Image: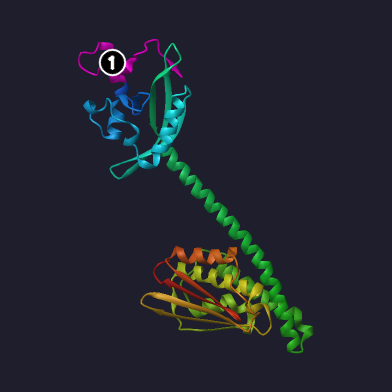
Amino acid sequence: MHKDDNQGGASTRPEGDDQPAVFNAQRAMLDATSDCIKVLSPDGLLLAMNEAGRVALGIAPAQVRGVPWIPLLPASVQAAADEALALALTGVTARFAGHSEASGQVVHWDNLMTPVVGPSGQVFSVVCVSRDVSELVLLQHKLDRLLLREQLLSGEMLHRIKNLFTVSAAVMMMADREARASGKADQLAMIAEGKLKALSRVYDKVLATDDLSSVQMRSLVKAVLLPFGNQCRFSGARHVIPEALANLLALVLHELATNSVKHGSLSVPQGQVHISWKTAEGRLALKWLESAGPRIIAPPDRCGYGTQMIDQLASTVGGIVDRRWHAHGLHVELQVPLDGA
């Protein structure tokens, strides 16, 4: 809070060439700063403003005095400015964040409002100093995005680890069923080892790297679904998939398979999954059709992390995911542009 023994204050003096030299010097000093400095009356009218403020608000020097200040601000900032002015008029220094746009660029401001109080304790003007904090705000936004990305990556890693245990347990059950059905129970360890090695190859070649060479679609699907044995069938041409799209499709297929192991057709011995794909007009259409699985009464009430991740992966390349829950299995169709990854 600033006290002034002159009830009229500097803000009531005329702005003209007939001002004393000291006031011209003060004005030149204020005009030299890059901060936007304004003096406001209690009813929110501009009394004086330095050059930086006039440039920021687009006002000529002769138009400053008596102009309502808050309507000059962006609509989204006006409520915060009104609250800050009201607080300053009670004798308390106030602060609010604002922004403006000039030449297509957004400028972020930190606005400090200091009441000027006379000897009687009455606030007769408010000094508002607005400082350009765009670099700090942009840096904070960048840090927030990096933090969010790290949180997503951490969540995805935990999700993959949990899925790995789930799929490993399912592979062991499949190996046990295969050994019993073939009358080779004594070879359970060998069958399980083969399936787990296949699962390991999936993680090594497909899921644990972002640097894939271009691969054929059939080879990709076969690599991802090999651990699930003959319960998975696939059909489609030998299309070559771009590097980035191959990794995305591998993740999507693995998520679908993991979800099926938990809740769908791959959770029961008789369950079947058929995967097919085709390309047309620069887009890849992949279908995942489950059948003979546990009966589905209704679609799930909420989407799990895996489902959300599939949607996010598809959206990053301009893709579309369509899910339909039929009585005996989930049907999923994924469409992605071949050159959008």
In the shown orientation, is residue 36 left or right of residue 93?
A: left
The quadrant in which residue 306 appears is: bottom right
Assign a secondary structure to mark 1: loop
* Residue 125 in picture, x, y percent from top left: 38, 21
Residues 329 and 339: in front is 329
Q: Where 302 falls versus 153 (above or below)?
A: below
In the displayed image of the protein, which residue is found farthest to the right? 186
Q: Which residues are magenta?
A: 1-29
Task: Name the residue tied to disc 1.
Answer: 13
Label 1 CA crowd tier, 10 Å (few <14, some 14–19, many 20+): few
* Residue 135 in picture, x, y percent from top left: 41, 39
Q: Where 45 falls versus 147 (above or below)?
A: above
* Residue 167 in picture, x, y percent from top left: 66, 71
Residue type at mark 1 is: Arg
Residue found 69% across the figure and 83% down from its top: 269
Residues 274 and 99: in front is 99
